[in-house]
Image: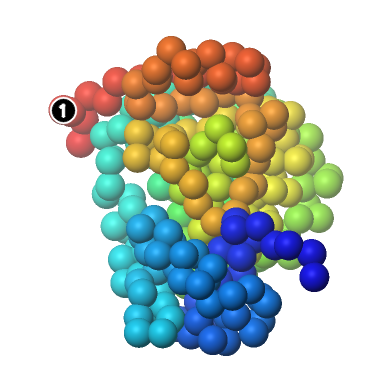
Amino acid sequence: MEKMFAPERRKIILEKLNEKQRVTIKELSKEIKVSEATLRTDLTKMEGDGLLQRTHGGAMLAENSDTEISFSTRERKNKNEKYSIAKKAVELISDGQCITLDASSTALELARILKEMQIRLTVVTSGINTALELHDHPDITVILLGGIVKRGSYSLEGSLGVNILNQINIDLMFTSANGFSFESGLTDFSVYEVELKKAMVNASKKVVALLDHSKINKNSIASFASLNQIDTLITNYVMQDSEIKKLKEQNIKAIVVSADENIH
């Protein structure tokens, strides 16, 4: 059998956990056809990354894994930073453009700023909250992508809404992610949400990543945008020279903002 790489194995493990909540090493070994020792190493590494909790003879979904953290909790996390990043992102938007916003809490901050502006836009989004935030604006046309409503969240996932994307010319996509790394680009937990995000990335002329410091140099399970698909990265993470150099090599423009602690 063809050798499966660790990221692929880990993706399968996480999919199984999302499906069943708990798995045993024995059943994983049968299914993935690798030794139990290899799987123990995988599970230990994944536990270290906060993706799961080890149990006797297997693993279960981590109680506090990001897959399970509710949207309202994520929204409160690093709120000032997200606001500062969103405020900077608005500067990239011009009157008359068509933009997409993912279902992240950072994109919701961006929508809240747009709501107060006099601007004419078409906004395509996979975020239910984001659509509701903007739908009263007299000059913003909101298109909500169809899909499955994700439990514990206000986002849509799956590929049901993808056809709409083929009919629209999108200038800019604003997206956050669970993690950003130089190896994997932008990554997320939900394999199903990633499907929709990939389609959104492919349909957009430019992709702007909105990432607070907690997301940088962190890998999640499934990649939805490789480095060569990202145009701009807005973050409050203080970049090292070597990291700035790597981004420049990939033609990614890095915009570093400082979060104002007095923002509420």
- Residue 144, placed above or below residue 211: below
Q: Position of residue 190 (x, y in %)?
A: 55, 62
Q: Position of residue 132 (x, y in %)?
A: 48, 53
Specify how the rendered protein is coloured.
Answer: rainbow
Q: Quadrant of the N terminus?
A: bottom right
- Kind of residue indicated by mark 1: Asn
Residue 27 at least partly seen: yes
User: For mark 1, does the 10 Å Cα neighbourhood hold few (<14), some (14 to 19), or many (20 or more) residues?
Assistant: few
- In depth, the one of 263 and 31 nearer the eye is 31
> In this image, 7 relative to 244: left or right?
right
Q: Quadrant of the C terminus?
A: top left
Residue 153 at least partly seen: no
> In this image, 237 relative to 26: left or right?
left
Residue at (46, 65) in percent of width and height:
41
Residue at (46, 25) in percent of width and height:
234
- In depth, the one of 118 and 165 nearer the eye is 165
Q: Secondary structure at mark 1?
A: loop
Q: Position of residue 10 (x, y in %)?
A: 56, 64
- Residue 126, placed above or below residue 160: above
The residue that disc 1 covers is 262
